[in-house]
Amino acid sequence: MSEPARFPEALLRERCETLLTRAGASPADASAITRALLHASLVGVDSHGVRLIPHYTDMLRSGAFNPTPNRTLRQTAPAAAMLDADNGPGHPASYEAMTEAVRLATKTGIGAVGVFRSSHFGAAGAYALAAAEQGLIGIVTTNSDSAVCLFGGAVPFHGTNPIAMAAPVAGANPWVLDMATSSIPFNRVKLFRSLGKPLPPGVAVDTGGHPTQDPEKAAFLQPLGGEEYGFKGAALAGVVAILSAVLTGAAIDPEMAPTDAGTAQNVGHFFIAIDPEHFVGRAGYDAAMTRYLTRLRGSTPVDPNHPVMAPGDREWKEAADRTEHGIPVDPDTMRALGLSSH
Amino acid sequence: MSEPARFPEALLRERCETLLTRAGASPADASAITRALLHASLVGVDSHGVRLIPHYTDMLRSGAFNPTPNRTLRQTAPAAAMLDADNGPGHPASYEAMTEAVRLATKTGIGAVGVFRSSHFGAAGAYALAAAEQGLIGIVTTNSDSAVCLFGGAVPFHGTNPIAMAAPVAGANPWVLDMATSSIPFNRVKLFRSLGKPLPPGVAVDTGGHPTQDPEKAAFLQPLGGEEYGFKGAALAGVVAILSAVLTGAAIDPEMAPTDAGTAQNVGHFFIAIDPEHFVGRAGYDAAMTRYLTRLRGSTPVDPNHPVMAPGDREWKEAADRTEHGIPVDPDTMRALGLSSH
């Protein structure tokens, strides 16, 4: 297989925005969706990158994403707000929610915004990063439709329910975590199918809920921790479901329509921002964060050729490479974006 | 081996409080430490229960825990406060911090309190539960001295850095998660040594950082997720370190003196309280939480004889049993508490 063709970020941005507005999104919403997709594409999380454009334009055209949402943000307390996303795309609602959480936290120390009647928002890390870019710690959760079994469960219950956190680092890229509470996403199972390779142990189960390493038999996912410690991953998925859905009035995971059903899902998200200024103070935070990361990256590795990395290090390296050499785009997505390698 | 003798909660409470005050703690601090220990002992987390009394009385006598701390709580913003625990025991500082987080959140929607210059606080779940008992969601983190390797790391870096969350359930016991970000605690390694049984894969490494299932060779722990997905557990340990220590000015994990060094550790904790009243509202929250748990517990299990459980279910069942039949106490701890089985 030849290397996929690469394209500059600016070109992809223009194509994405054009296609999204053509599908009915406002220019502002198209810009917010594109910002989130390009974050993922730049840092190498291609599953949540520009590849999603045809899916999103379908959702906008079918009305599964309301293309003209009337979002309402309501401050409910000095450090809290609720955002009704009116079944629009999750991305603009999420940037708006995190912007509000940051605004609140700057005054109150910590702020939180719950979002309901929302939709798929792409990569959770995009919004955590939006807080870190303002100098605050950002924490983001979203629930999603059932894909992961419970510990001891035979059917899918929670979504892949990611947790993201970003923390600013003085003079450097933020520390960024963006993880599903399953070990792998279902896309990875499909990849192993196409490669004809067995799955790692403890990541998937068959239709009866029994662990399997056969990607053809894998029907859904196990929570992080696998057969012995999956109760931890399942509980983390529960943290996400409680904050994102129970606390906001969104649909709980097993009540949610499947992503491909073409109907509004009432997805819930939760955004927390924390201003270090109101805890140890900016100078103390900056010094400690730098010291923490210096120690972490300098920690003795098992393999001297592979230094230990902090969450985000691999992604920032990839982003630098892609900024310089372009973002790789698979052939299907090239066609969808009207791109040619010539 | 015969069953350990069991003792009523009230008797253990009296013995613990007496021994702690005799070791120099104030009656109020002795009461807070005992409350946290008895929470753990009641729900079956014996590693963090009354077994710790001789350790804590040693720490109080040696001055590793300042027996007469002058704690100072300083509100820094409408939803934020910092608590200097003055190197006293972590338990009274932690109840005080969560009480303050709840007080703030009741007014502002979400509140957070950072604690620094603190010490071991026992089971994190005890303080999350204190919020849930007031009708709020509580989230608790603490860092600790190095015991867990990084992903690809050959030496211990993070502590077992637990994350706890408790969420109130109308008319029932709260949902409670209290998990280390390693797969197992080091005490479990010792248990496998005494049993002469191999460890599960992916939980421990030898002195070179290489995975081992031999409990005799196990030198420290792997992060949750093991050899394939340990980057997730390591990142969660990082979430805990950043919130508990970087944000509060406490010692970061690899800077912290070992627990048994007999000196103050400058442990950091972070407490968040969230009031559902200021998000979806109490009625909406209560209804959704009950619906979520009903669906979860009713989800098809792999084994029909083992219904799926929510985090905390096993612990609440154990607590009911121990309330009725007494709390089992091992012989060493019986001696320390001056208890006799006759």
Image: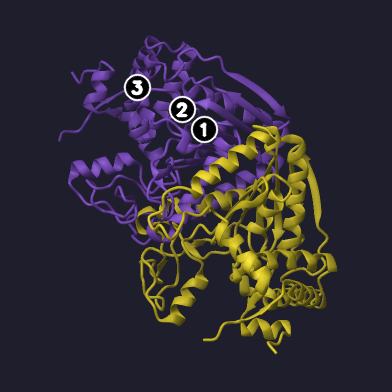
Chain colours: A yellow, B purple
- The image shows residue A310 at horizontal and vertical percentages of 53, 52
Which is closer to the viewer, label 2 or label 3? 2
Same chain, labels 2 and 3: yes
Which residue lies at the image location 44% right of the left edge and 22% below the top edge?
A: B33
Q: Between residues B323 and A314, which one lies in front from this camera angle?
A: A314
Residue receiving disc 2 = B265
Q: Amino acid at mark 1?
A: Ala
Q: Amino acid at mark 2?
A: Gln
Which residue lies at the image location 26% right of the left edge and 40% below the top edge?
A: B190
Residue B17 lies, with reference to residue B145, above or below; the image says above
Q: Which circle's residue, 2 or 3, is located before the other in the chain?
A: 3
Which residue lies at the image location 54% right of the left edge and 64% below the top edge?
A: A146
Q: Between residues A286 and A60, which one lies in front from this camera angle?
A: A286
Labelled pair 1, 2 in contact (Cβ < 8 Å): yes
Residue receiving disc 3 = B53
Judge left or right: residue A109 versus residue A236: right
Residue receiving disc 1 = B251
Which is closer to the viewer, label 1 or label 3? 1
Looking at the rendered image, the quarter that the C terminus of chain B falls into is top left
Q: Which circle's residue, 1 or 2, is located before the other in the chain?
A: 1
